[in-house]
Amino acid sequence: MPRQAEGGSNMREILEQLESRRAAARLGGGAKRIDTQHSKGKLTARERVDVLLDEGSFEEYDMYVTHRCTDFDMADNQVPGDGVVTGWGTINGRLVYVFSQDFTVLGGSLSETHAQKICKIMDMAARNGAPVIGLNDSGGARIQEGVASLAGYAEVFRRNAEVSGVVPQISVIMGPCAGGAVYSPAMTDFILMVRDSSYMFVTGPDVVKTVTNEIVTAEDLGGAKTHTTKSSVADGAFDNDIEALLRVRDLFDFLPLNNREKPPVRPFFDDPERLEMRLDTLIPDNAAKPYDMRELILAIADEGEFHELSQAFAGNILTGFIRLEGQTVGVVANQPMVLAGCLDIDASRKAAKFVRFCDAFNIPLLTLVDVPGFLPGTAQEYNGIIKHGAKLLFAYSQATVPMVTLITRKAYGGAYDVMASKHIGADVNYAWPTAEIAVMGAKGATEILYRSELGDPEKIAERTRAYEERFANPFVAAERGFIDEVIWPHSSRKRLARAFAMLRSKTQQSHWRKHDTMPL
């Protein structure tokens, strides 16, 4: 009897110890640092996980892990979990692996064990075929650990590269992200930031001032506005932690779990046969007048929902996800409201990255075309428009997912080829009656073809009208089979939905190779 009592007592002690350890881990860097985090309008690492995942779904791993460093009095500064919360859970019932860095513990700095925790869940994600979401809030490598922390970073980087195109990777920057800390997010598929509280830079303002004598604020150097409008490093910026995390949940719903699965199919209540009569008047009578391509996207999409990405960067092209009959579709669309819809360096890079992602994860592509050509000028040529434009051409040419293209108005020159033309692999190519598919606009073409008549405005005007009648329409391309059908604008949703339904079982083989040599 006494032995049993002693055993029961031991069990109680162990359970008390377990709860004590759990409580210490949950407290992170302590109440004072948590209060500081809250005072900045930021959630703690665990609060972020709770917002991101389905209620009660989170299974935490490695809660009791501590660092092994003894230098610089670190042996006396050990916190269970070592500055990162890792584990798995679900978003709308679908498996996802998560790590959330805890800024209250040594500034979220990455140690050897911190890195090992992240690597463990990334390895599990690869084995089990599920996405990884990283909630980044870190000052960078833990200086006290020296090269061991750098080795930890490199282990994470290698895994980012290895699972690229295998499982989706999403990064949310929710605080400072400096030095080596920026390169792991940079290798992921999507980066979201929080305005006024998140930063990304390789070297901070102080180092910049020391080396180059430039005086710049952290916000201007690497804030959300900088990275969503200038650098294109980030795909979106949000006002607070909760808004950013809810946006991740929305994005996650469009994506497959891995590259061997198709995207999820969601219930829809929108008639695929729906006609949109307003589209018949979307294109202005004046060919030089712009219109908003988003109107067409919203008219086509189930329930008028468009999850746009990189909205603040390269506004002359639109990228994002819609659903057609409940199925995820990636959209690339020229935007006539900005630079007349011309392709330039930024637009080409933005669209190429998106096309590559969609192709890697079996997401069909819809391309909406109104492109007068590539943007001319020395700035474009000097900065490599040839190479950057080739990225988009390369991405489309390599894509094997179902691809449907709709030309609404202009499709001129090389830009016609690049924007998912029949010739580079699009499966179904439609055009509206307002489409103009030609080498260039009528005026420019006439002035080249009839250079000797330039002194006679009447004759040139007549030649221009004749060129427009012959070429400023979709029928020359249709006669050659480059356009499959000329459709009424109001029937666009119906025709596109039917096209993608027909293509659902598409298979396409490609040549064996170790990897491509995409123009970078």
Image (cartoon, grey):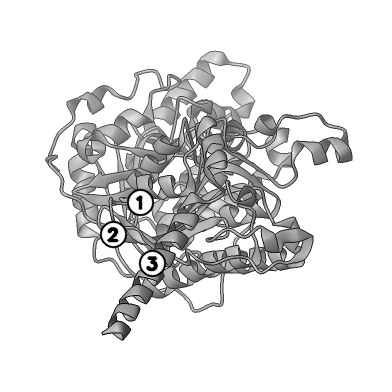
Marks 3/1: CA distance?
14 Å
In the image, taking residue 384 as reference, residue 510 lies left or right, namely left
Q: Secondary structure at mark 3?
A: loop
Q: Give the amino acid at mark 3.
A: Asn
The amino acid on which the numbered mark 1 sits, given as a three-letter code, is Phe
Furthest residue in direction front, as rendered: 2
Q: Position of residue 116 (x, y in %)?
A: 57, 69
Residue topped by disc 2:
94
Q: Quadrant of residue 403?
A: bottom left
Residue visible at 56% across and 29% down?
444
> For the residue labelled by badge 2, is the local secondary structure a helix, a strand or a loop?
strand
Give whichever of discs 2 and 3 has the lower sequence position: 2
The mark nearer the N terminus, 3 or 1, is 1
Disc 1 element: helix
Label 1: which residue? Answer: 252
* Closer-to-camera residue (180/104): 104
CA distance for labels 2 and 3: 15 Å
Mark closer to the observer (3, 1): 1
Residue under numbered circle 3? 259
